[in-house]
Image (tube, grey):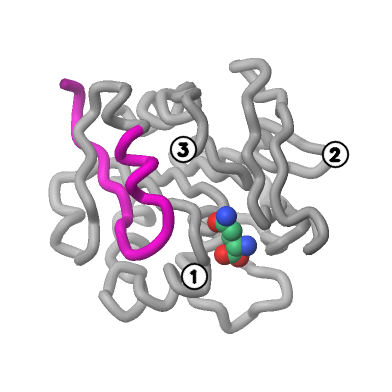
Amino acid sequence: MRGVVGVLALQGDFREHKEALRRLGVEAKEVRKPEHLLGLKALIVPGGESTTIGKLAREYGLEEAVRQRVEEGSLALFGTCAGAIWMAKEILGYPEQPRLGVLDVAVERNAFGRQVESFQEEVQVKGLGPFPGVFIRAPVFRRLGEGVEVLAELGGLPVLVRQGRLLASSFHPELTEDARLHRLFLELAGV
Ligand SMILES: NC(=O)CC[C@H](N)C(=O)O
């Protein structure tokens, strides 16, 4: 067993992330309250509904607690889809949507249009190669800050980015059997 990784378990597909971690031999801890962050150095924020996750995280004091830990450099984050939206500094068209605001990007929700609700397409991930991209009402990253590195694009649009110990994807690696992105996160988090 390697270390322990937190999975924000307020709403969304946190069970699939727990399963991906289990396959890597990592213990997953559900995070629902600020005190659950104690001792953790890595947290995954799942896909789901970013407005709900944001609202609950604010209500339960997790927004403030996670922000503090990220800002002091003691917590690495991996957000997928809605999780990535929650991490962003800016959510285009939704200035009031509750968010963590630590990832220096503007995110566009449902960026592939409503007709294309969900699709699967292979993306080329820097350093990893082809990866099965499961996109469900997926966002894209726009206006990237200086410290943000693009690790994958789809149709010229960034869909996987990294900023230091923050990793964010438009797509859902937790809905595939491929655990390489979870492994990459564990490496950058030092778990
Ligand atoms: N699959 C997802 O996580 C969808 C995200 C959704 N479009 C949102 O804005 O929250």
> Residues under labels 2 and 1: Cα distance?
26 Å
Along the line of sight, which residue is nearer the eye, 27 or 100? 27
SS for dot 2? loop
Q: On screen, 158 above or below 8?
A: above
In the image, residue 20 lies at what x, y percent? 36, 32
Query: Residue at 52% across / 66% down in the picture?
Result: 50
Query: Residue at 46% across / 66% down in the picture?
Result: 100
In this picture, residue 31 sits left or right of residue 179 = left
Query: Residue at 78% across / 37% down in the picture?
Result: 154
Are circles 2 and 1 on residues that touch, CB within 8 Å?
no
Along the line of sight, which residue is nearer the eye, 111 or 89? 111
Q: On screen, 68 above or below 51?
A: above
Where, quadrant-wise, is the N terminus in this rendering? top left
The kind of residue on which mark 1 rests is: Arg
Q: Residues within 10 Å of mark 1 (few under 14, many from 20)?
A: many
The kind of residue on which mark 2 rests is: Gly
Reading the image, the residue beneath label 3 is: 174
**For disc 3, does the CB lie below 8 Å from ligand 1?**
no
| Residue 168 shows in the view | yes
Indicate which label's residue lies in the foreground, 3 or 1: 3
Reading the image, the residue beneath label 2 is: 156
Q: Quadrant of ligand 1?
A: bottom right
SS for dot 3? helix
> Residues under labels 3 and 1: Cα distance?
22 Å
